[in-house]
Image (cartoon, rainbow, N blue to C red):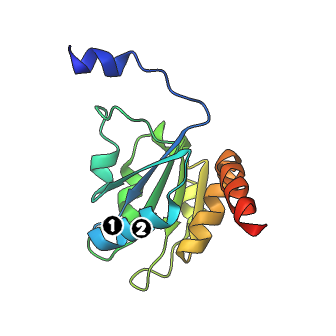
Amino acid sequence: MNSSKKKSNLKRDPNFKSVFIVDPIKGERIHLAKLLKQENLLIITFERLEDCLKQNNLIKTDLIIYVLRKGKNEPNKLKNIKKNIKNLHFIILTTTEFSEFKIEEFKGSGFTSIHKANNQDMVKNFIYTLMPECQAAYAEDSSLGAS
């Protein structure tokens, strides 16, 4: 059996969303991925923005979380991405290294859905706002434990 043919025949479930996390610090990437883990949410982590935006990625993303890090993941790297990718949802997570991020500058350069988060809880809230179907699955799970 040829596995590449098998993969190409798979249809994507519209309720299933994918999120790419870009952070050069492995432990932080994994921690954020665990925090965001949901039933209808596939989370894939990357060290560099270039890796997650490669044209040969089999999985297309619905949202990119870009964690700012001095000397590695800086805001200027976002300016060089292609126009069609700027139509994706972006959440920029600031850190103590980069607390200032001028979101208006990026909105003016073609990003249609870019949001600034100061902490991981804000990231989670933005995901639920941008992809409400993910919140519905989470709300059902949490209501079961409340009784």
Q: Position of residue 98 (x, y in %)?
A: 43, 80
3 or 111: nearer the viewer: 3
Is any atom of residue 125 visible in this view?
yes
Q: Is residue 78 above or below residue 95?
A: above
Asked whether, in this view, residue 137 is left or right of residue 86, the answer is right
Q: Residue at x 40, y 70 (%)?
A: 31
Q: Amino acid at mark 1?
A: Asn
Report the number of discs.
2
Q: Are marks 2 and 1 in contact (CB under 8 Å)?
A: yes
Q: Position of residue 10 (x, y in %)?
A: 42, 20
Q: Secondary structure at mark 2?
A: strand
Is any atom of residue 74 visible in this view?
no
Q: Earlier in the sequence, mark 2 or mark 1?
A: 2
Q: Amino acid at mark 2?
A: Val
Q: Residue at x 35, y 55 (%)?
A: 45
Q: Residue at x 34, y 74 (%)?
A: 69
| Label 1 crowd bin: few (<14), some (14–19), many (20+), radius 10 Å | some
Q: Secondary structure at mark 1?
A: loop
From mark 2 to mark 1, how far is it between C-alphas? 7 Å
Pointer 1: what residue? 73
The image quadrant of residue 96 is bottom left
Pointer 2: what residue? 67
Q: Residue furthest left?
A: 1
Q: Is residue 63 above or below residue 60?
A: below
| Label 2 crowd bin: few (<14), some (14–19), many (20+), radius 10 Å | many
